[in-house]
Image (cartoon, grey):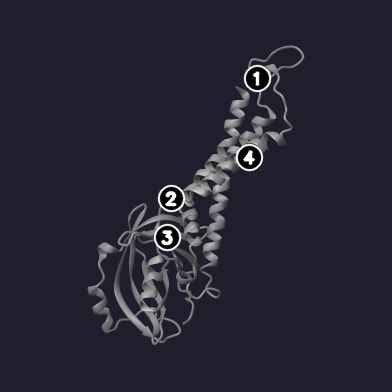
Amino acid sequence: MGLAVAVAVAATPILVLQMQLIQLLKSPVTVAVLAVFHDLMIVLYFVLMGGETFSEAQVIGYAVDDSELYRWPQPSRRAWLALVAVAAGGWVPRRVARAAAKRLKENSDLWKVSYPAFEAGDEVLQEVQLVTTGVPAGPPAQWAGLWRVSYAPHIRTLGSLGFTKFDVYYDIAPSAAASPEISSFVRFEGPFWRGWLNSSGTISTLSEDEVQVDFQNFWVDWDSEQPRRSGSDFFSEIAKKFFFLELSRFPVLSLDTSEGTTVFRFPALGVQIAACRVGPSGSDPRPL
């Protein structure tokens, strides 16, 4: 019985990690390799433990000394190590998520990466899934900062069709109000055009895991190194006609304020979008 318990407990963190990896990597070959890895780890665990044999008392779940059989369970060395392994089962995924968040932030570096959505490879999707921890949006006061979109497959598709690259920023002002101000700056560059597509408005929570963005002003800066912080031009009225509030509701899949990463979903296209905080509110985006 003791041996069976030890095997079950020791295998728990391995199974947890295996299931999480299977969700990320759907290939049947990957599943088979992980299954073999799981079995090898169990065997290796007992080999490293020196192949100890259980005494009769240990087999029935008790400890014994020179005089008598105590009538309460005594944890063996294996049991303590198994408990440590179980605790590690929760620590390992968190460590993996932090590493993925770091890679996402590297892909958002203002000075090293020109267009994150276009330079991100398919492996970035796995990092997005790893940092999607299910943490709700939280209070608006925690959202403040300049956020840069580091993963957005629909932007890459749109840009490829229009021979134009886009670099998207959201500047959320620090505020204790329920609907802080938000500005959007989209740097674009094509064969014969370049500049900034800008908008401003408010962002508010619909529930603990869903936000709504209401853009009210729109303007364009052509061939400008940095966008204007506010403005309005004849494009504003045209843009308002194509802005639908119903399409600006975004379920927040994850928000990690300590790492400065967030993942939200764009229901209209069924895609996940990742953004990283690259500076405090009011910071300049990467210049054109």
Q: Residue furthest top?
A: 68
Q: Earlier in the sequence, mark 3 or mark 1?
A: 1
Q: Position of residue 266 (x, y in %)?
A: 34, 61
- Mark 3: give few (<14), some (14-19) or many (20+) Cα within 10 Å: some
> Which label's residue is closer to the chain start, 3 or 2?
2
| Residue 80 visible to an observer of this rendering | yes
Of residues 147 and 203, the one drawn nearer to the viewer in this rendering: 147
The kind of secondary structure element at disc 2 is loop
The amino acid at mark 2 is Gly
- Comes first in the chain, label 3 or label 4: 4
Tag nearer the camera, 4 or 2: 4
Q: Residues within 10 Å of mark 1 (few under 14, many from 20)?
A: few
Front: mark 1 or 2? 1
Q: CA distance from mark 3 to mark 4?
A: 48 Å
Q: Which mark, by number, is residue 134?
A: 2
Which label is found at residue 59? 1
Q: Are marks 3 and 1 in contact (CB under 8 Å)?
A: no
Q: Residue at x 48, y 64 (%)?
A: 276
Q: Amino acid at mark 3?
A: Ala
Q: Of helix, strand and loop, which one carries label 1? A: helix
Q: Of the residues under marks 4 and 2, which one precedes in the sequence? A: 4
Real-space CA distance between mark 4 and mark 2, rounded to the nearest whole angstrom: 32 Å
Name the mark nearer the viewer: 3 or 2: 2
Residue located at (58% from left, 36% from top): 11
Q: Which of the two discs, 1 and 4, labels the residue nearer the N terminus?
A: 4
Marks 1 and 2, how far apart in space?
A: 42 Å
Q: Which residue is mark 3?
A: 141
Q: Is residue 257 visible?
A: no
